[in-house]
Image (tube, coloured by chain):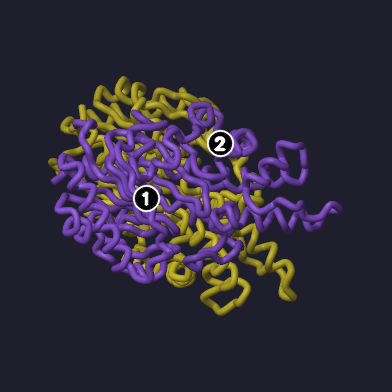
Chain colours: A yellow, B purple
């Protein structure tokens, strides 16, 4: 497999669309990110993306393929975006066909977190591993699973939706009617709602700056016991999700990236403690918990690499 | 792959050891089951098993391989039983080597629930499926996972331990220190403990016959609302475990066998209802929930078949 070839990676999030020409882990050329909220229909966004692809292809005629990650249920085999969790109006969009028509290049579509995981597995922290779960902690909890040296897709391409794993059968009702989904507890917004609720019940009340996980991180590092307890609680909940992955998949490693993972040892120390207490010692001893390596471009890098690897399959 | 070849299947449970000569799904000859509790050390049991293997091989000289399922963490690749959940004294037993020495035949070892799942996948209810989870509901909750047309084993062979999946991050502390393991709620003993607790709180008190799931089944079928509520509750808890498998693995089907699955529609009707309410409709529409086909011999049949299939790998 030649990995010095050029391909285009597209990373669509809930609010932005990022497009770049990629070689390995290198971003060769990056377009100005597009705010997806400025577009009223999928077609408008698709037209704008098509224009970007045409321009990039003219500038880089050796580009071989296009890969795109989308935030929701994506059927890679059929090339269809079934449903995007936080983007209204996207149902059963034949996105691979649209990309191929717009770019004139072989194209692949995949779930955005699967693209991130693919990048960490092929080129990042999980390189060379056969069984690994790569997570990204942000507004949601996304993940991709590698099992037996393959990206696990399942029957309809919907595998790896770790944010929907229940940690409480009587818990909150989430996006798909499902109770206790871990992302409904430790997603950025839910984490901060919890923080404000806890602070409100203290003598000091809610601090002036307590809107983002970074504020909560700073408070914990400054020694605030409320903030420290909240990080411990988030770690406990995340640990239960990872335990479930462990008992079902028995991976060699969890690779963790995304926003709240930046809290570092605040999250990782209690996370390791909760996992150690709940896993058979011989198995815990061989389980690695690693920070992601590729940062915010992992989604683009993974989509671009996946599209190249898919060329071998055709 | 010739499936009319003979092999020996060994199914070791918490209380009994069953050995048979198998052809496909047919039990050609079955030994008298051995009560494992009559043996004080692994070595005594191994000696007894070795004697059975020698006799069977003499009687069936065309037997090609031996496969054994064991109740606990088994590393198939290394051929080692790491730890057996309910059988004291079994740690790091090089069981494949022991079987090969005793029988003079190529041998394989695997987790018992994985053997059951292997049988249902190769020869039973899940035949021809690429992604499936096969469960057995009994004293514990065991399972095997097939993903991408392969039995999922994970890094140390410990994948598919679905009974340990947590349904409550603040739940009961289980065998490995882990909280909220589903088998600590719906395993036979826990289910009946719950039943007795609930009945004790009613005006009628605990019925005379309320020791086994069959008693609870009969009570529900006779119209007792306490028993019906208990089955609904068990289905809700099992549904959360299956939801977690669904979101991580996206299988085409759940195949369900073992003791309490015999309650049939009492369990399956509310189970489908809880799953339908918590899965994206397009995905639920394609998810099958099927009863197991091969019954109590699935473990022996799967172990025997696995040993034959492993011959191709060597």
Residue at point 28%, 25% (across, down): A103
Q: Which residue is mark 2?
A: B279
Q: How far across and down, in percent of the image, does residue B199 sit?
A: 77, 54
Quarter of the image for residue A153 reads: top left
Report if residue B130 is visible in the image. yes
Judge the density around disc 1: few (<14), some (14-19), many (≥20) Cα neighbours within 10 Å: few
Circle 2 — which element? loop
Q: How far across and down, in percent of the image, does residue A238 sit?
A: 50, 59
Which chain is mark 1 on? B
Which image quarter is the N terminus of chain A in?
top left
- Distance, label 1 to label 2, CA atoms, is 45 Å
Which chain is mark 2 on? B
Of the image marks 1 and 2, the number of the one nearer the N terminus = 1
In this view, A41 is above or below A67: above
Query: Which mark, residue B32?
Result: 1
Q: How far across and down, in percent of the image, does residue A54 sit?
A: 29, 26
Quarter of the image for residue A201 reads: bottom right
Q: Viewed as shown, does residue B103 lie left or right of A134?
A: left
């Amino acid at each position: 497999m030649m990995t010095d070839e050029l391909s285009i990676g597209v990373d669509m999030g809930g609010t932005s669309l990022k497009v770049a020409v990629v070689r390995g882990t290198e971003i060769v050329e990056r377009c100005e990110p597009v705010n997806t909220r400025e577009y009223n229909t999928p077609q408008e966004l698709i037209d704008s993306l098509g224009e970007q692809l045409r321009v990039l292809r003219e500038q880089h005629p050796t580009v071989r393929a296009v890969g795109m990650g989308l935030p929701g249920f994506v059927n890679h085999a059929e090339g269809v975006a079934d449903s995007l969790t936080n983007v209204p109006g996207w149902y059963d969009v034949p996105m691979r066909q649209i990309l191929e028509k717009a770019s004139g290049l072989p194209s692949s579509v995949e779930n955005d977190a699967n693209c991130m995981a693919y990048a960490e597995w092929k080129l990042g922290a999980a390189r060379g591993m056969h069984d690994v779960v790569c997570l990204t902690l942000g507004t949601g909890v996304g993940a991709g699973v590698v099992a037996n040296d393959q990206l696990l897709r399942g029957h309809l391409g919907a595998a790896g939706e770790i944010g929907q794993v229940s940690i409480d059968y009587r818990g909150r009702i989430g996006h798909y009617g499902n109770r206790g989904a871990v992302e409904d507890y430790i997603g950025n917004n839910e984490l901060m709602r919890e923080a404000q609720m806890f602070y409100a019940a203290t003598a000091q009340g809610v601090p002036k700056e307590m809107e983002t996980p970074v504020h909560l991180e700073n408070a914990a590092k400054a020694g605030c016991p409320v903030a420290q307890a909240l990080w411990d609680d988030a770690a406990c909940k995340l640990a239960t999700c990872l335990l479930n992955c462990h008992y079902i998949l028995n991976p060699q490693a969890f690779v963790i990236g995304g926003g709240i993972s930046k809290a570092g040892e605040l999250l990782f120390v209690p996370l390791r403690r909760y996992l150690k207490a709940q896993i058979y010692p011989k198995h815990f001893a061989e389980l690695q918990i690693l920070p992601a390596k590729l940062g915010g471009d992992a989604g683009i890098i993974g989509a671009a690499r996946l599209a190249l690897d898919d060329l071998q399959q055709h």
